[in-house]
Amino acid sequence: MSLDREEVIAKVDSLYRFRDLYFEEHPLSQAEQKPIDVEKKMNEALLVVEQNQTSLKNKAEYLLLKAKCLNVKANFDEEAEEAMSKAVKLDPKQVEAWNILGECFWKKGDIDSAKNCFSGALQHSKDKVTLRNLSMVLRQFGSSREEKLQYITESVSKAKEAVNLDITDGTSWFVLGNAYLSQFFGGTQNEQTLQQCLKAYTQAEKDAVAKHNPDLYYNRSMCYLYQSDFKSALINFKTASQLDPSWDLPIAKANMVRDYLRSTSSMLSNMCGLLGKNKLQKIMSSITDDDLGPYSGGSYTSPSGKTLALKPKCLNQLSPGSNAGIVINGKVIGGLSTDAAIPYTFFLVDSKENCIAVCLYNVSNAYGVKTADSIAIPEPYVMSVGIESGEGLVDSNEMKYNFIRVATPMVMVVNGKKLGIDKQAPTVLKVTALSE
């Protein structure tokens, strides 16, 4: 039975709705079946397009719909690129055709051609799909740090334009979140930028299409890791893995976090293997007020330039969150080698045999503390890990402990001396976008 033009177009559009809203009709347990089901629907739509060519306006429209069907797949399709290349030659003003061709180039890894397609499409019409596609590809450019930041800033601007054209579109919010995330890790790491990123992801999650994108949860996990919110990171890695079981990275990262938490918990419980040993007592007995170095005078100059009064306290006297006006000092009794996404971590003991983990961010790869080094930390920010064994996030044994989060090594005093800017290096994380 032949179909008219509107029916053919509707068939192709229904293919994308089937892919994007798959989990609205299917449980997560069928995630492995999704690519198979989508390919089946794709072949059905292709057949409809092939059998009803005469119902379409012209050859350009036929090629567009054919390529659109083939482009539903996550991977590059050479036949889709060939069809779209012909379509844009026949109808250069067709914005959708330029977008699909640009997406083909993006999947192929040809970012220069992808950028040209999206930039060219904007010359004909400003639409949200083109703007967010251009936002996505712009972040791949730049040979120097300054150049990269310029492109990222432009990427944020294009993503904002896409959101403003349709504030209900979750995919545009997702792309904006990714742009903010790139800006955060590629720039000055302003906390406000990270909050804007998380807010954009929250908006994206409200959308029926965007909330089923595994990249949304993976990238949000990386935000949570930077904030030392390990439980939320594990929850989002789990969701990303459920949405795309073939993607190994979320599982690998989640296992890395679990190993880190287990190791940290174990080292705290036995004080890095020194509990009850003479070496521990020797290290503790060497702790003195002189270890405070420049903080021994009872004041400290914060990164914002304010001079604040400080009062020494033991580790067990700290409260959750910020401990304003307090300084702690102790000795290093061990450390952990970690993945780039996990902060540099060492273990501190004070003169009263209290032990705590210290997560140090933005530290140079070439720097590390040694056992028996003295450490002083002003206004320590205390966080906690609290994961129950029945939550499905850890294999066994609950994990509960406190730790100190230090945002920059420049506030620390090591062996009586304040660390310099040469010990600081920004954390850099890659933003994933398998299906932006």
Image (cartoon, rainbow, N blue to C red):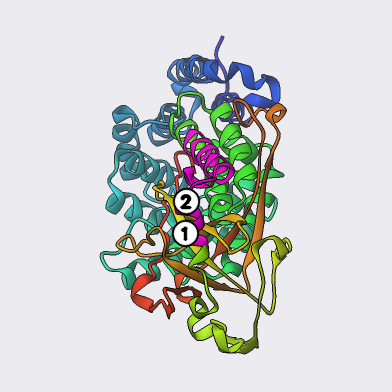
- Structural distance between the alpha carbons of marks 2 and 1: 6 Å
Identify which residue is drawn at 44% across, 69% down. 187
Can you say whether 337 is above or below 398 in the image? below
Question: Residue 70, image x and y in percent?
Answer: 41, 27
- Asked if the residue at tag 1 contacts the one at tag 2, i.e. Cβ–Cβ closer than 8 Å, the answer is yes
Q: Is residue 417 magenta?
A: no
Q: Quadrant for residue 349, please give it.
A: bottom right
Can you say whether 51 is above or below 246 in the image? above
Q: Amino acid at mark 1?
A: Lys
Q: Is residue 267 magenta?
A: yes
Magenta segment range?
A: 255-284
Q: Is residue 181 visible?
A: no
Question: Residue 410, image x and y in percent?
Answer: 45, 75
User: For the residue labelled by badge 1, is the local secondary structure a helix, a strand or a loop?
Assistant: helix
Q: Quadrant for residue 428, please give it.
A: bottom left
Question: Residue 82, image x and y in percent?
Answer: 29, 33
- Residue receiving disc 1: 282
Toward the front, the furthest residue is 278
Q: Amino acid at mark 2?
A: Asn
- Residue receiving disc 2: 278
Toward the top, the furthest residue is 1
Identify which residue is drawn at 51% across, 24% down. 245
